[in-house]
């Protein structure tokens, strides 16, 4: 027993390192896939050219495909997979509800309402785009959930019910605006965004998504011990010195901000935050020191491959990423439920 404990951190870091290598390989392979075949050598040359390390002649068309399209969308997909997986993990732990996901707080519905208000009603005077409107709508929806939960005693059930109410309210507002003000082209564009899309992402959005994902990883890893304690219940956590209210509010706020930031970039992407934490628990157990990095890396890999496959199978028009995650996520989630039932 004394010899086993030093080995655990070593195994943890080896698993994390292997996951990071798998993520890098997945991104590189995903970039090669599409209507235009591009070799790994050319990808290496393009990336090192833009990094200022080399000056190797490459075709302009391949340079544009890699640097302006496939690499940004793969990085944003990885960032979204990381952030949404961690938000799902946080909510399932904080609310002690295995069905919790990043959108249970109404953030996604608020984002859709904000984006539609900007895109169709022209609110913001042209200063805000769809992403800006989506972010503001997400924050408004989260504030509404906090207010409702506060007046409903602020316990776990209150947060969940407030999220359901907020989701229904903002979904109704979105549907009303689309029905009343949208023409066919506007409705199609907004619906495509609401399904989740990595089409047309640019490097400014890459930097934003990566920064949001990195913040989520750092804070979640720092809160791993508190999350472990909270799994035993609020009374036990309080007895062990955890300020339950402060931890819950701060991490719920983090979840809302991370989800809002990612939704504003890529739209609503479902099932990642619901499914990935369950897969992580089946593989890693329930210690958050390992659950956090594994969920982050596996969520990123999952998103990169869903995007790559949706780009291949539905070429030349890529399937909205939210549809792809649902198509893959639903069967996986059902399989997890059946496996847990068989164990039980």
Image: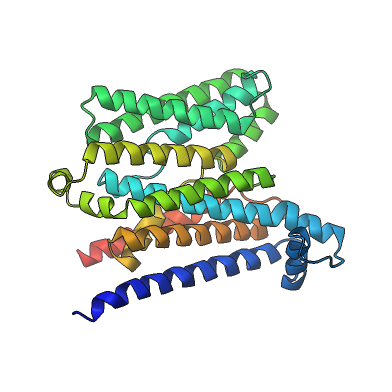
Q: Does 201 sit left or right of 288 as displayed?
A: right
Q: Residue at x 45, y 25 (%)?
A: 140
Location of residue 321 in the rendering, given as x and y in whole percent from the top left corner: 57, 49
Q: Position of residue 112 (x, y in %)?
A: 53, 31
Horizontal arrangement in the rendering, residue 274 relative to residue 21 (left or right): left
Q: Is residue 132 above or below residue 215?
A: above
As displayed, is residue 86 above or below residue 248?
Answer: below
Question: Quick check: can you spot residue 197?
Answer: no
The quadrant the C terminus occupies is: bottom left
Q: Is residue 192 left or right of residue 327?
A: right
x and y percent of residue 72 in the render? Answer: 66, 52
Left or right of residue 17, residue 116 in this image: right
User: How did the renderer colour the structure?
Assistant: rainbow
- Total number of numbered discs in the rendering: 0
Residue 182 placement: quadrant: top right
Q: Is residue 47 visible?
A: yes
Q: Quadrant of residue 126?
A: top right
Which residue is at 53% across, 32% downward? 135
Q: Is residue 38 above or below residue 205?
A: below
Work out which quarter of the rendered image holds the N terminus and state it: bottom left
């Amino acid at each position: 027993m004394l010899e086993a404990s030093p080995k655990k951190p070593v195994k943890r870091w080896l698993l994390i390192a292997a996951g990071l290598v798998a993520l890098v390989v997945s991104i590189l392979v995903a970039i090669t896939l599409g209507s235009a075949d591009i070799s790994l050598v050319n990808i290496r040359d393009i990336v090192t050219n833009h990094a200022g390390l080399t000056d190797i002649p490459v075709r302009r068309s391949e340079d544009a495909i890699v640097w302006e399209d496939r690499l940004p969308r793969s990085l944003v997909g990885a960032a979204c997979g990381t952030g949404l997986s961690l938000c799902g993990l946080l909510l399932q732990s904080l609310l002690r509800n295995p069905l919790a996901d990043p959108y249970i707080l109404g953030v996604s519905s608020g984002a859709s309402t904000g984006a539609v208000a900007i895109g169709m009603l022209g609110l913001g005077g042209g200063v805000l785009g769809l992403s800006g409107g989506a972010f503001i709508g997400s924050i408004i929806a989260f504030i509404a959930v906090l207010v409702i939960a506060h007046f409903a005693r602020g316990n776990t059930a209150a947060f969940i019910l407030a999220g359901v109410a907020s989701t229904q309210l903002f979904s109704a507002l979105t549907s009303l605006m689309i029905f009343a003000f949208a023409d066919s082209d506007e409705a199609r564009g907004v619906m495509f965004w609401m399904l989740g899309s990595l089409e047309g992402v640019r490097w400014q959005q890459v930097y934003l998504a990566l920064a949001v994902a990195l913040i989520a990883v750092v804070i979640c890893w720092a809160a791993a011990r508190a999350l472990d304690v909270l799994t035993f219940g609020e009374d036990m956590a309080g007895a062990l010195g955890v300020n339950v209210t402060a931890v819950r509010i701060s991490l719920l706020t983090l979840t809302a901000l991370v989800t809002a930031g990612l939704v504003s970039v890529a739209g609503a992407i479902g099932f990642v935050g619901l499914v990935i934490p369950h897969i992580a628990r089946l593989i890693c157990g329930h210690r958050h020191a390992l659950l956090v990095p594994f969920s982050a890396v596996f969520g990123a890999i999952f998103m990169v491959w869903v995007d790559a496959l949706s780009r291949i199978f539905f070429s030349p028009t890529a399937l909205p990423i939210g549809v792809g995650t649902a198509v893959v996520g639903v069967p996986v989630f059902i399989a997890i439920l059946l496996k847990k039932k068989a164990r039980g």
